[in-house]
Amino acid sequence: MKKLLLLLLVPMVSLGQMDYYVSAKGGLNVREAPEARAKKVATLLYGQKVTIESKTDIKLIINDTDKETGITKVVEGEWVEVIFGTNFKGYVFDGFLRKNSSSFLTRNDGTAWTDGTKSIIFRSLSSIEYRESKEPVRGYIFDGFLKKSIDNIKFYNDQGYFIIIDSIVNTKNIYTISSKSAIDVRDSPNSSGNVVGKLMSGMAVNVLSETENMLTINDVDNQVGGSREMPGRWVEIETYSPLSGHRQETFPDNNGSWFYVDKAEASRIVKDPGKFDCHMCGYQAIKENTLNKLLFVREEMGDYGDGEYLKHTFSIEKKEIVEIKDYYDYNDPVSSKRIWIPINSNSVDIDRIKNRNKPKEYSQAELDSISAREIELRALQEEEMTMDDTQYYFLNDARLIEDPKSSKDFYNNGLVKFFNPNLQNYMEAIDDLNTAIEINVVQDEEELWVGPAYFYMGIAKGRLSLNGVRDDWKMAASLGFYHAKKAIRESEYFDLLKK
């Protein structure tokens, strides 16, 4: 009788029968009543299908740690009644149920990884809410409405990335709005400041600075009518914008502009890639998104029929993600491998993975056994991939830094003015790149961007018919930049100087 009374007291919300799949990798316990202490009647396996009969509206929040990756996520949900097997019934926590069988992106949605130098965040395709470019919102909010999390984050300016690429520092500084309702962003750190924007629950922001004074406010829950005291302080924030990333996209004509495409359009492109048998066009789209593997391809056709093809694969091996790039530039294939570990790993593991991902350093014996030409070809292919990424970033995503101070600030501005057609100014690009190099020399730092800086500065001088092109390329070559060596050696390379 006690059991019957308990079940009668549970508020049931009938949904009609809906099929779901178990997403908990260690399985999911089924209980005879909607509470954690109730008797366990069965254990559902990972990926097993169940049918939700009804919801109880009994909420639950748990911390779940992935045994493979070590990543802990906050999982919210409620107890639901399910049917499984041959008409068995019971109650499970629906935070571990998914509408569709899991894919790589849904399994790793909201997880952040690092290769020791930069970071990536995976997003499920269903979480993408593409929005046209907007100016970021910057101002002050009360930090009691912030939580340090990337679970189910939303972007004020969502560019459609299913993989976000950024620095480790920026990723670790992501917070999300935890208020159930929209909160006001103000132009000064007090409640009387002018409202400069509103941010919805789950919106991602970076904290720029904190005020010193602590205060306590009364937060009223409009849904239940209660209030609570909330300690905190005013902080300056800006809506988070990723440095770059991967998205499904296409450029269907010869203007070189890439356009975001949704899941349906990308699937059609993959099924019919023959539509890109053309000049100056291309696409990037996901070909496989299964439980343990993500594969997407990027194909571009040049103006004369020459093509480039990149096959990009992510897979999980133990507690690491293995990234393989298979790159075909015309007829020269090259492959690279990179290892990623959870971003919350300890510093020892991050240093270890950073060293594993370093480019191979050849011993003298290896140098003697490999022809110089073969080494150059490998280096040119690797540089080509980096230069493509550089051009894409500074053409589409990078923004001018208004008050540049560091060498990297001036380097950023120099390449924005070099690549971006709306801001293009070769003379200013030369000045900024030269300043970046001068600051770097004073600081006596070994930076990988210095060689490319000399190289692009030489191109800019050539396009303005200025002296010093070969001098800059010689400096780039002396720093190990192989494209500069090739530019000096081959006269046809001076086509780069054409506007």
Image (cartoon, rainbow, N blue to C red):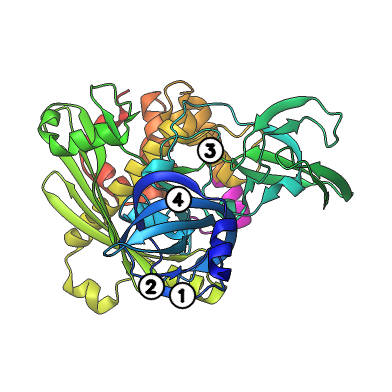
Reading the image, the residue beneath label 4 is 54
Amino acid at the residue labelled 4: Ser
Q: What amino acid is labelled 1 in the image?
A: Lys
> Which region of the structure is painted magenta?
437-447
Mark pair 3, 4: CA separation: 32 Å
Q: Which mark is residue 43?
A: 2
Q: Label 1, label 2: how many angstroms apart (C-alpha)?
A: 8 Å
| Magenta stretch secondary structure, dominant | helix
What secondary structure is marked by label 3?
Answer: loop
> Which of the pair 6/91 is nearer the observer?
6
Distance from the alpha carbon under mark 2 to that under mark 4: 19 Å
Q: Nearer the viewer, mark 1 or mark 2?
A: 1
- Inspect the image, locate mark 3, and give the three-letter code of the amino acid beneath it: Phe
Mark 1 and mark 2 in contact? Answer it, CB < 8 Å: yes
- Name the residue beneath numbered marker 1: 40
* 3 or 4: tag closer to the N-terminus: 4
